[in-house]
Amino acid sequence: MIRVEVVLAWPDRVESRQLELAEGATVADAIAAAAIDGGGNCPAVAVHGLLAKGSQALNDGDRVELLRPLLADPKDNRRRRAGAR
């Protein structure tokens, strides 16, 4: 068994679940087991801050982070700031 944490931390909402999963469990398995409302609809997932796919295998102590959609495109923001100078 491995222990992992699944975290959803958005500006208006924070949820965390500590899970024990079988060896070889994937990111998708952890998200399903956590059953965080809206967690399956997240556009991106990270493990310890690095983007991950649902098929990625987890290790003991991993933290799966459910990421919210971007509010603005970072490239557009940079262009806007550069144009304002």
Image (cartoon, rainbow, N blue to C red):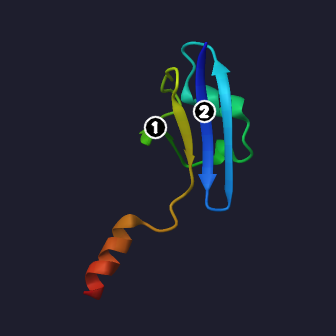
Quickly name the residue at label 1: 48
- The vertical placement of 69 against 3, above or below, is below
From the image, which quarter does the N terminus lie in? top right
Q: Secondary structure at mark 1?
A: loop
Q: Work out whether residue 15 or residue 79 is closer to the camera in this orientation and state it.
A: 15
Query: Three-letter amino acid code at disc 2?
Result: Glu
Q: Label 1 crowding class (10 Å Cα cut-off): few <14, some 14-19, many 20+?
A: few
Q: Secondary structure at mark 2?
A: strand
User: Which quadrant would residue 23 be assigned to in this image?
Assistant: top right
- Which residue is located at x 51 percent, y 29 percent? 62
Give x and y (percent) for residue 61: 52, 25
Give x and y (percent) for residue 17: 68, 35
- Which residue is located at x 57 percent, y 54 percent? 68
Quickly name the residue at label 2: 5
Contact, mark 1 vs mark 2 (Cβ under 8 Å): no
Kindly report the distance in space between the C-alpha atoms of the residues bearing marks 1 and 2: 10 Å
- The vertical placement of 12 against 29, above or below, is below
Q: Upstream in the sequence, badge 1 or badge 2? A: 2
Q: Is residue 59 left or right of residue 12?
A: left
- Which residue is located at x 26 percent, y 79 percent? 82
